[in-house]
Image: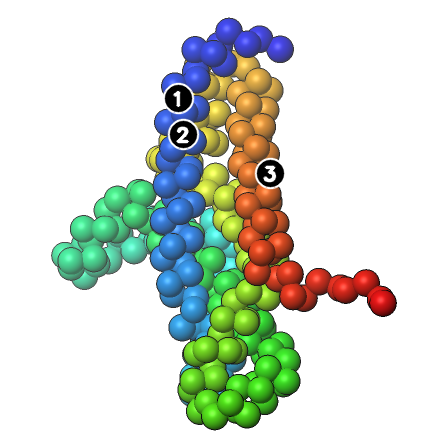
Amino acid sequence: MELAPLIDAAPLYASGLATTLQLLVAALAFGLALALPLGVARASSHAWWSWPVAAYTFVIRGTPMLVQLFIIYYGLAQFDAIRESVLWIGLESAWFCAVLALALNTAAYTAEIVAGAIRATPAGEIEAAYSLGMTRQQAFVRIVLPSALKRALPAYSNEVIMMLHATSLASLVTLVDLTGAARDTYSRTYLPFEAYVTAGLVYLGLTLLLVRLFRRAEARWLQHLAARPAT
């Protein structure tokens, strides 16, 4: 394994890492902001709230993210109405299109995670809230939603890791992320093994870091759900 070319490519990998982290943070922030109201609507017993969200999550989860990214980046540009609208300010940017595709995708999965956690709220928690004189809305805001978000942490951690790996698709729309850095290094050095193994190791390190962070968060906020030893 030749290390000298990889050392020379270190600045390129550092820039790719920065792009990957920017994509991940932006997509997760926008995706979570969209997923919370969608998750609440998805868990609603009213069909006119739940069904549109169900249709959205079905379409997004039922199609590959690569196809979604290509539709946003390449497909929308063919419409004159899009190119002449204010939307084109964002859609002409590869970075914006990548973040939009990632955010819409994670929003669909996260909305289902949140909805499932809301539905799984123990009846005793709701009854306790009512016994304290809370209204239905107060019980939902103060008890049901915070409790559901905490229980959703393990599933959401998996979604975050999947989104980290999904950022690699951004290299297909001209962005130089970690995968793009590996591709460029390979094209310059003709060392595919070294180039892509280096990127894989960085992804692995980021994954381990995310796992540790979420485990600490779960240990803090889900401690009450841990099994207690018999006395």
For residue 149, say whether it is visible.
yes
Local packing at callout 3 (Cα closer than 10 Å; few below 14, some 14-19, many 20+) is few
Seen in the picture, residue 8 relative to 82 is either above or below; the reply is above
Q: Which residue is mark 3?
A: 208
The residue furthest right is 231
Q: Going 39% across and 51% down the picture, which residue do you hit?
A: 27
CA gap between label 1 and label 2 equals: 6 Å
Type of colouring = rainbow
Amino acid carrying mark 2 in the image? Gly
- At label 3, the amino acid type is Leu
Q: Identify the residue at image location x=62%, y=77%.
A: 120
Estimate the x, y position of residue 7 in percent, counting from the top left. Answer: 47, 11
- Whether residues under marks 1 and 3 lie with C-beta atoms below 8 angstroms apart, the answer is no
Q: Amino acid at mark 1?
A: Leu
Q: Which residue is mark 2?
A: 16
Residue at label 1?
12
Going 20% across and 53% down the picture, which residue do you hit?
A: 88
Q: Which label sits in the foreground, 1 or 3?
A: 3
Residue 62 visible in the picture: no
Residue 77 placed where, x, y %? Answer: 26, 52
Element class at badge 1: helix
Question: Which quadrant holds the C terminus?
Answer: bottom right
Please give the name of the residue rendered at 43% of the width and 24% of the height, measured from the top-left corner.
13
Q: Nearer the viewer, residue 217 or 181?
A: 217
Query: How many numbered tags mark residues here?
Result: 3
| Residue 171 image position (x, y, % from top left) | 42, 36
Secondary structure, mark 2, is helix
Identify the mark at residue 99; answer none if there is no mark.
Answer: none
Label 1 with label 2: CB-CB less than 8 Å: yes
